Image: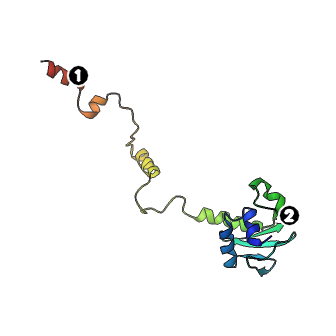
């Protein structure tokens, strides 16, 4: 099976064209050599893939006939990626700003709710008398019409 089709079928990339583009950018290698999209994958090959600033290593156990479900991926490949790579990924995720940078655009709905909760301007407060809220009373207007 071609390597681009293999990476797509084991769900490493969302589409086959994305897999092909990554191979063209020299981010995929079998063993130590960078490959082309047409390279055939065999059982026992160790594929090195650079994705999300991490060097993944997967060992081919079995070649699937077509795209497989996510639960069946472990039957076809074995992840032999170094644990250090996953630790680097965790550190990078923690170092990124949690939400978004301050002063970057107008507040989102979540931001507005947090601001309202902090300042005490809660929109969901209970109004027992809606007529007082709007400044008019229907009963007062009806009495003026009757007289």
**Which colouring convention does the figure follow?**
rainbow
Q: Which mark is residue 116?
A: none
Q: Nearer the viewer, mark 2 or mark 1?
A: 2
Residue 130 is situated, as x and y percent measured from the top left of the image, at: 31, 30
- Precedes in sequence: disc 2 or disc 1: 2
Residue 35 is situated, as x and y percent measured from the top left of the image, at: 76, 79
Q: Would you identify the image quadrant in which residue 4 lies?
A: bottom right
Q: Nearer the viewer, residue 115 or 30?
A: 30
- Side of 2 relative to 113 (left or right): right
Q: Residues within 10 Å of mark 2 (few under 14, many from 20)?
A: some
Residue in view at x 26 percent, y 34 percent:
134
Location of the C terminus by quadrant is top left
Residue 37 is situated, as x and y percent measured from the top left of the image, at: 73, 76
Residue in view at x 29 percent, y 33 percent:
133
Q: Would you identify the image quadrant in which residue 43 lies?
A: bottom right
Q: Secondary structure at mark 1?
A: helix
Q: Residue furthest bottom?
A: 33
Residue in view at x 45 percent, y 52 percent:
111
Q: Which mark is residue 62?
A: 2
Location of the N terminus by quadrant is bottom right
Q: Which mark is residue 139?
A: 1
Residue 51 is situated, as x and y percent measured from the top left of the image, at: 68, 70
- Visible residue check, residue 52: no
- Visible residue check, residue 136: yes
Residue in view at x 52 percent, y 58 percent:
99
Q: Residue furthest left?
A: 147
Q: Residues within 10 Å of mark 1 (few under 14, many from 20)?
A: few
Dot 2 and dot 1 residues touching (CB under 8 Å): no
Q: Would you identify the image quadrant in which residue 69 lies?
A: bottom right
Q: Secondary structure at mark 2?
A: loop
């Amino acid at each position: 099976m071609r390597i681009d089709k293999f990476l797509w079928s084991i769900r490493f990339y969302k589409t086959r064209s994305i897999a092909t583009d990554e191979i063209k950018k020299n981010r995929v290698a079998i063993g130590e050599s960078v490959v082309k999209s047409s390279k055939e994958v065999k059982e026992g090959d160790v594929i090195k893939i650079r994705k999300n600033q991490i060097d993944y290593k997967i060992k081919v156990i079995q070649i699937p006939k077509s795209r497989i479900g996510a639960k069946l991926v472990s039957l076809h490949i074995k992840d032999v990626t170094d644990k250090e790579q996953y630790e680097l990924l965790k550190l990078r995720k923690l170092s990124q700003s949690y939400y978004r940078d301050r002063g970057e655009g107008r507040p989102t709905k979540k931001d507005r709710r947090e601001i309202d909760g902090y300042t005490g301007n809660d929109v969901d407060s209970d109004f027992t008398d809606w007529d007082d809220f709007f400044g008019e009373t229907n009963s007062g207007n009806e009495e003026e019409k009757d007289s």
